[in-house]
Image (cartoon, rainbow, N blue to C red):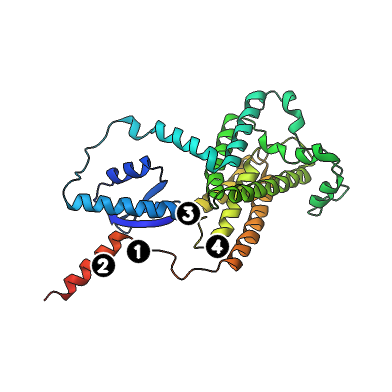
Amino acid sequence: MIRVAALPIDRDLRPLLVAMARQGIRHRVVEESGAQILWVSNEDESARAQELVQQFLELQAQGKLQDLPPSSDLRGYFPLKKYINDGLRAIWTAPVTCTLIALALLVALVSQLGTRLNPVAFLFYPAPSLGADPGLLSLLTVFGQLNGLGEMLRTLTPMLLHFGALHLVFDVLWLWYFGRMIEGSNRGLAGSLVFLLVVLVTAYVSNTTQYIWTYSSNFGGLSGVVYGLLGYIWMWQVIVPWGRLRLPNSMIGILILMLVLMEVFAGAWIATAAHIGGLVSGMAMGALIAGIHRARHPRPKMIIRASSIDADRNAETDNDRKQP
């Protein structure tokens, strides 16, 4: 996330936020130190958002923009048109994310949320032999025992299986959030290819780790990949803090805490090994790719441009000080 502006706490930002929503600018407003802080998701949207902030401030200064009355229209809380536009736009900007979600929903429909497994039995993890003492090296051992493309794909396809509506909704929503962020971090085909590589690696490691841990193929879900994407973004913001991939530290902490709590209170029903395998492999992928990016693109001298409102405020302060 990129900070765009700090606005007074008592200022009605609804006209500004409506204009940003109409232009498809993803944004967030949080309260910090008695001010409203406006954040957007990437640099391209930051430039457009700053223009809108400037127009908003000018119109308010001229008295042409009045505060809106409290709204009771539910469309303000459920902007269906915006959701549809975001979905259509994501087909072009995040095709891998949309394809994975569509496949997961299709499998859930065919299997009736995991209650009819016969039609999707071919998606379960294969059953290679691990020997008497399986360990981390079994990740490579399993890969060496796969016979043909079919079994290789079956090490990935458990991510499409879901057992219950809550399981499906949790995974799909987080995949939608993280997937669009990673695919959109690089323009065009490059972002989708990097994202696909991360998904394939984290899916294989998370599924295989779960199989090694339980010696059973009775598991599934995108949660391992979701935690892999979390680890990938986490390492990116640590190694390339000026980059586009950023998450609030509180969000990272909550998801890690959820991982621990799910194991403590629902370990018998949760594929914890898959979550941990996905998280660790995602962190490794993030550290590797972010490290290469940092070596090739060192930190720029100026990465944050002062917003117009901050510049105006500083200028006014300086003028006040100069007056006798």
Look at the numbered discs 2 and 1 and tell me whether their residues touch, using CB distance below 8 Å.
Answer: yes
Which residue bears the numbered disc 3? 248
Which residue bears the numbered disc 4? 238
- Tag 2: Cα neighbours inside 10 Å, few (<14), some, or many (≥20)? few
Lower position in the chain sequence, tag 3 or tag 4: 4
Q: Report the mark closest to the observer, 4 or 1.
A: 1
The residue at the point 44 percent across, 53 percent down is 44
Which residue bears the numbered disc 1? 306
Q: Quadrant of the N terminus?
A: bottom left
Q: Amino acid at mark 3?
A: Pro
Q: Amino acid at mark 4?
A: Val
Location of residue 258 in the rendering, given as x and y in whole percent from the top left corner: 56, 46
Lower position in the chain sequence, tag 1 or tag 3: 3
Lower position in the chain sequence, tag 4 or tag 1: 4
Where residue 83 is drawn, which disc sits there?
none
Look at the numbered discs 4 and 1 and tell me whether their residues touch, using CB distance below 8 Å.
Answer: no
Distance between mark 2 and mark 1 Cα atoms: 10 Å
Distance between mark 1 and mark 3 Cα atoms: 21 Å
Q: Amino acid at mark 1?
A: Ala
Location of residue 207 in the rendering, given as x and y in whole percent from the top left corner: 72, 43
Nearer to the camera, 127 or 146: 146
Distance between mark 3 and mark 2 Cα atoms: 28 Å
